Amino acid sequence: MIGISKLYCGTVEPSDALRYGRHSGKLPSHLLQFSKDKRPVVVWNITQRCNLKCIHCYAHAKDVTFKNELTTEEGKALLDDFAQFGVPVVLFSGGEPVMRKDLPELARYAVKRGMRAVISTNGTLITPEKAELFKEIGLSYVGISVDGMEEVNDRFRGVKGAFQGAVTGIRNCQEAGIKVGLRFTMNRLNAAEIPSIFDLIEELNVPRICFYHLVYTGRGSKLIEEDLSHEETRAVVDLIMDRTKDLHDRGKPTEVLTVDNHADGPYLYLRLQKEDPQRAKEVLELLKMNEGNSSGRGIGCVSWDGSIHADQFWRHYSFGNVKERPFSEVWSDTSNDLMKKLKDKKKYVKGRCAECQWLNICAGNFRVRPEAVTGDLWAADPACYLTNEEIGIE
């Protein structure tokens, strides 16, 4: 996760994170990525059921009833373990989490145990009543997925009316006083929509948006050929920086982040070296605090059935199940060879990643992408768009 607005627009200084000792339990949410202890933010996919049919869904979600979900009591036991372990944020996801009837009870319990509870949703089921309930519970944030304007989004989501439903969900959250943001997964089928998405967040006064790079897993594995080329990715990241700066300069600061490609960090730094060398030095310090991709360390995932994964895209590999061993125990058990390597994967990456001068601030990027393309999870990430010259090799 790269905070474009934080880094490029100078809204965060290294001293901001240092003031809290870089401790995940003390840092405000917008600084959590700069924590030193990297206590895991956990994505809990509480259900596989979903009312939409998104073509890039990593969870293979369907609108059917699945009988393998953790029970409410098992969920509360999981949240107890998270709290004791120091998990700072629980992200309730799916499928579509709002379809699970005990979501409010589970979210309330997470907040009661001292964690920040956030929801990742398609937004179409957030009625005014649900939004008011989420506000009363104390949800920190609702992230609503939109992958283009109406025609493109509805094609991605597989259901006509999904866009208007999401917009209604956004407005319902805003009226209830809940912080709400957008989530957008970039690829060739919707990259041209990004300017319109910036217009939309300005029109709706949405304070936050995350632009996700494509990860080749779940139904998204069928979109590999639709992933942006390196040149297209550079152009898109430049566009995102330009539009973010424009909002900032016009007195409409918006939190803008890119997710799932840590090459964005060095790319932003190299651009700032040309534009503002002094700010570039500060950004480099912040990127070192960020430490790059943190799958298996600073981010984890629990599936609807209790399986534990390195992140929400590693569903093909489970370290264990919370029904058999607590998440905290499994997460700390480095007798598992993959878990051990993910704790410090910079030692194991190969190819361009191993030679890259930015390895300490990228950490080898996403491992599931090279595994999907080459079969070797330690090979260089094919989505890294930096040139050999930019990464310091001949």
Image (cartoon, helix red, strand yellow):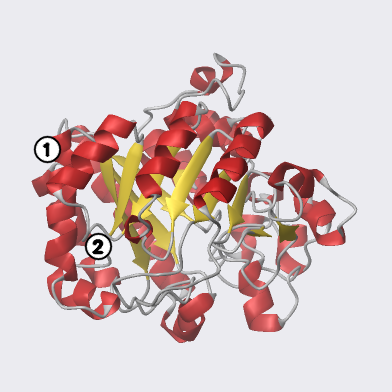
Dot 2: what SS?
A: helix
Mark 1 or mark 2, which is nearer the start of the sequence?
Answer: 1
Asked if the residue under mark 1 is in contact with the one under mark 2, i.e. CB atoms within 8 Å, the reply is no
Horizontally, is 307 left or right of 240 in the view? right
List x then y, in percent, for residue 129: 16, 44
Q: Is residue 312 visible?
A: yes
Instruction: Report how far apart the C-alphas of labels 2 and 1 lie in the structure.
Output: 26 Å
Name the mark nearer the viewer: 2 or 1: 1
Q: Residue at x 38, y 29 (%)?
A: 10
Q: Is residue 361 left or right of residue 214?
A: right
Q: Is residue 164 above or below residue 134?
A: below
| Residue found farthest to the right | 335
Residue 1, numbered label: none
- At label 1, the amino acid type is Glu
Q: Is residue 167 above or below residue 248?
A: below
Q: Where does the image place residue 345, in percent across and percent down from the top left?
A: 77, 54
Is the C terminus in the top left, top right, bottom left or bottom right quadrant?
Answer: bottom right
Nearer to us in this view, 190 or 160: 160
Identified at 30% across, 70% down, the residue is: 191
Q: Which residue is mark 2?
A: 194
The residue carrying pointer 2 sits among few (fewer than 14), some (14 to 19) or many (20 or more) residues within 10 Å by Cα, namely many
At label 2, the amino acid type is Ile
Frontmost residue, 203 versus 135: 135
Q: Please tell me which residue is depicted at 26% across the width and 34% down the height of the picture.
A: 135
Classify 146 as above or below 127. below
Q: Would you name the residue on which mark 1 appears?
A: 175
Question: Which residue lies most toward the left here?
Answer: 203
- Identify the residue at horizontal 53%, vertical 66% (top origin): 385
Q: Position of residue 1 (x, y in %)?
A: 50, 48
Residue 297 in the figure: left or right of residue 136: right
